[in-house]
């Protein structure tokens, strides 16, 4: 689709597409109380329901895998759709006519996508029936000749496109499809001839089993098209870089097993599934690329990102090695571990099954090796390891592979492994690895692909300057209930100076709050220095830049509770949210959410706009979680909200008092009386503020401890 969907239409789709009705198509839901529904999560394997749907807010959230969002997000994830595709499908479901804002490029007419999908479904049924005809005998012979049965062909939806030139066109025109739809769908050429003629076909479907296009193989010797395989051309629904054959059959098992096996052909997918490898897929008419990788990662979900396996199958020949190197270069697209399964005799999975049976196919996958090792061995294998200079050249060529390994804790082990493969002393190889780390683009002659897996970081020792309990005191501290920025006589900012530009104190009254995200501080991850292989800012273990807060952490309960109140009951707070400031939140992600809540302009769709104000998926999911989690009181009051705000502020002030006392203790009043007296005055002010906050939090029941 060219152009953009009108924002009002998107809002109307969200309004009309009830999330409980959409989710019920995939999940059995039951009443969870409080207006919510629950069921088994469709995005990860579980036995106890942790998947919750809140119809009143139009949101879903899984407390097990931390996946959540609105109706559009759910359909994107469950059906592996883009945002636009999900909106289009929901619009078709709810009868919303989408208006496209023209961006100067040709656009797809309204309703065309639905008509194309209907035409593809009709064509798939036509091809399936034609396979059973007399002319289709050649296609049936192809199926049996590849070791499959009629039942297998039916399961995979195989069909046959007859010769004749206009057979499919005439059939679909008779069913009421227009010539424009048939041409736009890629079923018929502009000249009016059928696109597929005299070929065996496989329908290429999305995860919802909608037919997007077809892959076809020649079976007649007199076929005038020289290409052995032909695919549907690019259409509004078929984008070869975004589709995978077998996805409709493998989707559920990919999510359950956190595994995907990537093969190179349609019959290879069939062989894998028939042999019991039900997570196999194949790209269609193009190499497996970054968009395919993103598609697979979405299917495996959050759990698969950590524990999943992406297994490539390559032939053992030069083409297979080249494909493996390309996969390795694209490996940063995956957060899952990547492997390669190579058949040493050059057999593809289909040929392997024909010659050695189903067990051999399963054994091929079971013998998978890490992709990095396969690439490493092939890189080293290009050198003469019987010569000293050959071994050194091999070490230099393979060293970048070691430095690019995702798990930094394994770098030392893989260095020893490389030394063993080459036959060199491990210390000599380690020096080459260190050199490759320090000079990643130093032009090593080996030509091995360098591929740092991203920077490493974690929520750890520091929280930022001037924050409580983390790092060092830098002259910043909480704003007093009645105070603004103050300065010491020597010009330094007072510990009770206003943070964030002197925001006024918070009042809990009727009104609505508002959000734009701030970056969450992440301290650089350091690695044990005994190996000296991974530097603080270099590639290493991939750790999310935005940490996920533990909802059970008692030290963070007040922060979580306050954010739930602010998101679910904004009318209890005024527009300034000023008693609490971002620095009062110990956890950086809670701090980011608070900033979103505080700065998003109030009005219609406020909660939705908070989610749209950040591009950080972790923050988005946390906002959804906070929106659907129950608060401790069914009908919270302004005084209850005030108690929460005071509690969060109090914990912050207590930390500042401790920091200030520590600084006073280290300051000699005789040597620096001005600074000492100023800090002492600030301490008195903070102690007074502490007492006010204790009284404020006691004004309502407190049950977070």
Image: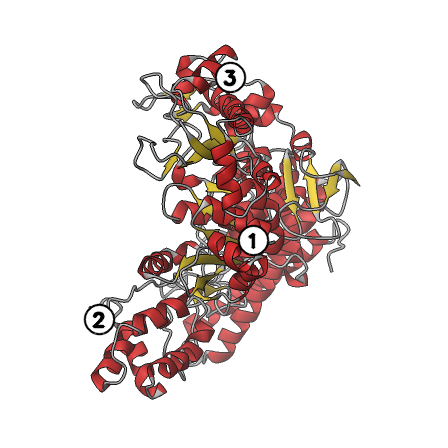
The answer to which quarter of the image holds residue 441 is bottom left
Depicted 425 relative to depicted 115: above or below? below
Residue 260 placement, left or right of 182? right
Name the residue that disc number 3 marks.
Answer: 97
Marks 1 and 2, how far apart at CA:
36 Å
Marks 2 and 3, how far apart at CA:
57 Å
Residue 151 is situated, as x and y percent measured from the top left of the image, at 62, 39
The answer to which quarter of the image holds residue 224 is top left
Dot 1 or dot 2, earlier in sequence: 1
Nearest the eye: 653 or 469:
469
Depicted 619 relative to depicted 142: above or below? below
User: How many labels sit on residues?
Assistant: 3
The residue carrying pointer 1 sits among few (fewer than 14), some (14 to 19) or many (20 or more) residues within 10 Å by Cα, namely many
The residue carrying pointer 3 sits among few (fewer than 14), some (14 to 19) or many (20 or more) residues within 10 Å by Cα, namely some
Residue 166 is situated, as x and y percent measured from the top left of the image, at 40, 17
Name the residue that disc number 2 marks.
Answer: 444
Tell me if label 2 and label 3 are in contact, CB under 8 Å: no
Q: Secondary structure at mark 1?
A: helix
Residue 302's label in the rendered image is 1
Marks 1 and 3, how far apart at CA:
34 Å
Residue 502 is situated, as x and y percent measured from the top left of the image, at 46, 49
Inspect this view and state whether residue 68 appears. yes
């Amino acid at each position: 689709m060219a152009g953009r969907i009108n924002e009002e239409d998107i809002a109307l789709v969200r309004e009309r597409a009830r999330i409980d009705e959409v989710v019920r198509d995939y999940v059995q839901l039951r009443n969870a109380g409080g207006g919510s529904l629950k069921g088994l999560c469709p995005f990860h394997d579980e036995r106890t329901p942790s998947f919750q749907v809140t119809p009143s807010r139009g949101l879903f959230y899984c407390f097990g895998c931390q996946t959540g969002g609105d109706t559009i997000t759910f359909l994107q994830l469950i059906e592996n759709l883009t945002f636009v595709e999900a909106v289009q499908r929901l619009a078709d479901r709810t009868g919303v006519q989408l208006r496209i804002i023209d961006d100067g490029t040709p656009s797809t007419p309204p309703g065309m996508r639905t008509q194309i999908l209907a035409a593809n479904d009709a064509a798939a049924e036509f091809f399936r029936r034609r396979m059973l005809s007399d002319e289709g005998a050649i296609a049936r012979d192809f199926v049996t000749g590849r070791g499959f049965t009629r039942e297998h062909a039916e399961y995979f939806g195989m069909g046959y496109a007859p010769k004749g030139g206009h057979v499919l066109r005439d059939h679909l025109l008779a069913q009421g499809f227009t010539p424009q739809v048939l041409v736009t769908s890629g079923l018929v050429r502009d000249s009016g001839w059928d696109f597929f003629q005299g070929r065996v076909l496989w329908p290429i479907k999305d995860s919802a089993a909608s037919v997007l296009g077809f892959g076809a193989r020649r079976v007649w010797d007199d076929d005038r098209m020289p290409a052995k395989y032909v695919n549907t051309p690019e259409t509004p629904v078929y984008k070869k870089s975004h589709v995978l054959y077998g996805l409709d059959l493998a989707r559920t098992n990919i999510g359950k097993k956190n595994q995907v096996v990537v093969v190179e052909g349609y019959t290879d997918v069939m062989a894998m599934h028939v042999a019991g490898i039900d997570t196999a897929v194949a790209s269609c008419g193009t190499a497996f690329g970054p968009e395919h990788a993103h598609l697979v990662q979405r299917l495996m979900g959050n759990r698969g990102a950590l524990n999943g396996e992406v297994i490539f199958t390559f032939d053992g020949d030069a083409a297979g090695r080249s494909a493996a190197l390309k996969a390795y270069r694209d490996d940063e697209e995956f957060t899952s571990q990547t492997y390669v399964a190579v058949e040493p005799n050059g057999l593809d999975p289909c040929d392997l099954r024909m010659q050695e049976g189903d067990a051999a196919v399963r054994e091929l996958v079971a013998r998978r090796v890490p992709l990095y090792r396969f690439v490493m061995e092939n890189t080293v294998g290009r050198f003469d390891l019987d010569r000293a200079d050959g071994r050194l050249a091999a070490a230099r060529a393979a060293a970048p592979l070691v430095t690019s390994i995702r798990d930094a804790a394994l770098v030392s082990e893989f260095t020893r492994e490389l030394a063993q493969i080459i036959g060199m002393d491990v210390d000599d190889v380690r020096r080459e690895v260190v050199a490759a780390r320090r000079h990643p683009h130093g032009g090593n002659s080996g030509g091995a692909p360098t591929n740092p897996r991203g920077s490493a970081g974690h929520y750890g020792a520091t929280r930022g300057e001037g924050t409580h309990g983390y790092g060092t005191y830098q002259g910043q501290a909480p704003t007093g209930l009645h105070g603004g920025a103050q300065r010491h006589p020597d010009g330094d900012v007072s510990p009770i100076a206003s943070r964030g530009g002197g925001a006024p104190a918070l009042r809990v009254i009727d009104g609505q709050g508002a959000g734009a995200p701030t970056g969450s501080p992440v301290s650089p991850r350091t690695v044990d220095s005994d190996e000296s292989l991974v530097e603080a800012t270099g590639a290493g273990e991939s750790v999310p830049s935005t940490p996920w807060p533990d909802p059970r952490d008692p030290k963070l309960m007040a922060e979580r509770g306050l954010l739930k109140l602010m998101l679910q009951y904004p009318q209890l707070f005024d527009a300034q949210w000023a008693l609490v400031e971002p620095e009062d939140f110990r956890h950086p992600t809670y701090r980011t959410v608070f900033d979103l809540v505080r700065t998003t302009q109030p009005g219609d769709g406020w909660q939705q706009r908070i989610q749209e104000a950040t591009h950080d998926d972790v923050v988005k999911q946390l906002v959804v979680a906070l929106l659907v989690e129950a608060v401790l009181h069914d009908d919270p009051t302004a005084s209850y909200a005030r108690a929460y705000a005071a509690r969060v502020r109090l914990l912050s002030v207590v930390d500042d008092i401790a920091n200030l006392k520590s600084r006073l203790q280290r300051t000699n009043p005789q040597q620096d009386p001005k600074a000492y007296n100023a800090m002492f005055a600030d301490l008195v002010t903070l102690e007074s503020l502490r007492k006010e906050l204790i009284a404020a939090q006691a004004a309502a029941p407190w049950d977070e401890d």
